[in-house]
Image (spheres, rainbow, N blue to C red):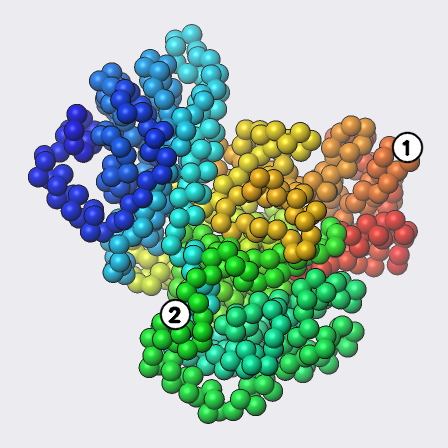
Amino acid sequence: MDGFRTHHMVLPRWFELAISIVDCALYRVRAHGAEFVPAAGPAILLANHLSTVDPVLLRRACVRPVRFLRFDSAFERHLMMALHEGEAVCLFPEIEPTAFGQLHRFNEDLLGAVLRAVRTFQAPIIPVGHDGIWGSVFSYSWRHYIWKKPRWTRLAISVHFGAPLEIIEEGARLDGWPTEAAVKALSLQVRQGLLDLIARAFADRPILRRHLGREVVKSLAGRPGRIAVIDRTSKRRQVSAGRVFAAAAALSRWLRRHSPAKRVGIVLPPGAGAVIANTAVLWSGKIPVNLNFTAGASTLRASLEVGEIDTVLTAKAMQEKLPDFPWPQRVIDVRETLDGIGKFGLLRWLLAAWILPSEGLSWLLQIPKRGDREEAALLFTSGSAGAPKGVALTHRNILANCEEITSTNVLPEAVTLLGCLPIFHSFGFTVTVWYALLRRMMLVTIPSPLDTKRMIDAIRDESITCVVAAPTFLRPLLKKAQAADLRSIGLLVSGAEKMPLEMHAAFLETLQVEIMQGYGLTETTPVTNMNIDDEPLCASQGDVRSERGVGVPVSALLKPFAGQVGKRLGSVGRMLPGLTARIVDPDTGNPLPLDRTGLLLFRGENVFHGYLKDPEKTKQALREGWFVTGDLARFDEDGFLFIEGRLSRFSKIGGEMIPHGTIEQKIVSLFGFDQRELPVVVVVGVPDASKGEALVVVTTEALTVEEVREKLSGAGLANLWIPRVIRRVGKIPLLGTGKVDLQASRALALRGSEE
């Protein structure tokens, strides 16, 4: 009964001892919840599968000997034999290690065998979630085994055992085999349990306790000669990592002396100046607050008041461009301040970056080692459906989201990233500033995503491999770009709003680029989900060139896990590692199965802890640590998330929940409207004395109520779903983030027609 067991064989003691020595030298394993594993008797452990050495790590974590079975033709016979002998058996329902770092599809035959075994032996099913091994030489991270940079410290592995699952009995067929419904129910239970445990294991990562600023110092000083930013604001300017470090270091020391404020506002477009300003504020021990300069003056005044901001870093050009901006008492021009510091002041920091180790540089800059749950940044929500709220993000939040993105291998170091999203946009803030700095990516910036020509020029001239933007900013590419202009793109991600499927098809057909839809919110720092191309974007070694010029490692051509998929059209992808979710009834809050449509809740280390100075809204948004997204969603059996619509974008008429987005899509499709450049239709709900709410179509097109009724009725839509009012407007209002401004659209619907 003792020893390490795999399949039906027991390994010799000397071999087990050798494995244990290597194991202890490479890994530091911490187990939690081991008391859930019964000390004796049959038990089935179901674990996530990250690497080929998972059995070695889980064996160390478990309090009793465990038999690990591989899935083959003799699997069920060995499972029954082991349980009959009272053994604990560990299985991997995914069958093979993940190729994407995410929890992928479960094998239905394996789960069916588990159900039969449970019925026979009444063995408990114990979920086991572990984290920390992904990225090692034994995992398939970066799409290959073995050939990775060596790690000189022991990996911290966290293993969490969960309480035994309460099996929902769905019955059996006449032959005694579990029904498909029973297997599906077990699959959903296991997925929910593993997601919860993996999120707990992820929370134990040591890096999450560190200080974001210190990690940025380490990255910039690690290779000071590399190009960190190519700024295309006016004329093309290359800025090395060493120069970014020097400018940010000098400015941070200046801010320590001249600004006593806790938070410092930043009003700058994407560019080297914004990267330097954010880094400098963080290194000065203060909190950067990137302000949405496209918002109205009253909204900005409220933001300045909530954040207690009396100092703003900006540029003279921005002050001239924004005459109505409610500038606070102190406005600091970044370029003028750096000029005042002088070349010698910058040069000594540049030399320090080349000479001193990162720990010494952090000491000189007075950056603490630990950041953890201290506030690191303040962002404001987009305000698409109401007043913006102040989202205080911690060091742990930002580092966690960067770690989660890294764990999918979707954005490796060799990527050239287009920075076009405004920095006050949560994705622009986290990904195109901090992630790009931490992962030593080359960032190419343009000042506005609305400047389509400049975007195309940057992609073509700089051979950009990754572009992230909202559909509003991507649509114009269909008319103004040629396939040759986008030849270098290996990853095109759409976020911030739902991507129309016709837009995906148009990009693929016209420009030979597939859009990967993602999902996130300001409160989740922001990324939670992403579709991942089955072929990797690029790699640091062994590349070949595809027809579009995208680097692909040779090993990817011999991919061992060809059956695994990382994308599903219509979904926003699987959740990033480290996050877990719940689907609950919108009215009662009771949990629903993951595959049922309901209100989506998230929990993870990238989820914020509350709105600044707004306990009432914080209470509404957070339920016992779960963030209420406000979106209605469901998961499919493979873990892909489908967003059905915003709860606020439903109208309750006649007791029925009617989705605005579905009606919009039907109108666009039935009338053949072109939304490739700008949205032309938005449906909103307005108060109605008789039915509570009424549907109004706000559109730039010349539509009549009769035409809309005829088309929608002909398409089979129920009478309650057909809008009775049409408001024609000059254009659909948009926010600076690219989202439709629903609040302004609703105001137009209430006010009346506008030419």
The percent coordinates of residue 339 (x first, y second) are: 56, 89
Q: In this rendered view, identify the residue nearer to me: 134 or 572.
A: 134
Q: Is residue 711 visible?
A: yes
Up the image or down, 723 lies above or below 700; here it is: above
The residue to which callout 2 is attached is 218
Q: Quadrant of residue 12?
A: top left
Q: Quadrant of residue 59?
A: top left
Q: Is residue 626 left or right of residue 711?
A: left
Amino acid at circle 2: Lys
Q: In this rendered view, identify the residue nearer to me: 375 or 534.
A: 375
The residue to which callout 1 is attached is 690
Q: Quadrant of the C terminus?
A: bottom right
Q: In this rendered view, identify the residue nearer to me: 324 or 156.
A: 156
Amino acid at circle 1: Ser
Circle count: 2
User: How packed is label 1: few (under 14 Cα within 10 Å), some, or many (20 or more)?
Assistant: few
The percent coordinates of residue 223 (x first, y second) are: 36, 74
Q: Residue at x 43, y 83 (%)?
A: 349
Between label 1 and label 2, give the one nearer the viewer: 2
Q: Quadrant of residue 220?
A: bottom left
Q: Is residue 649 left or right of residue 313?
A: right
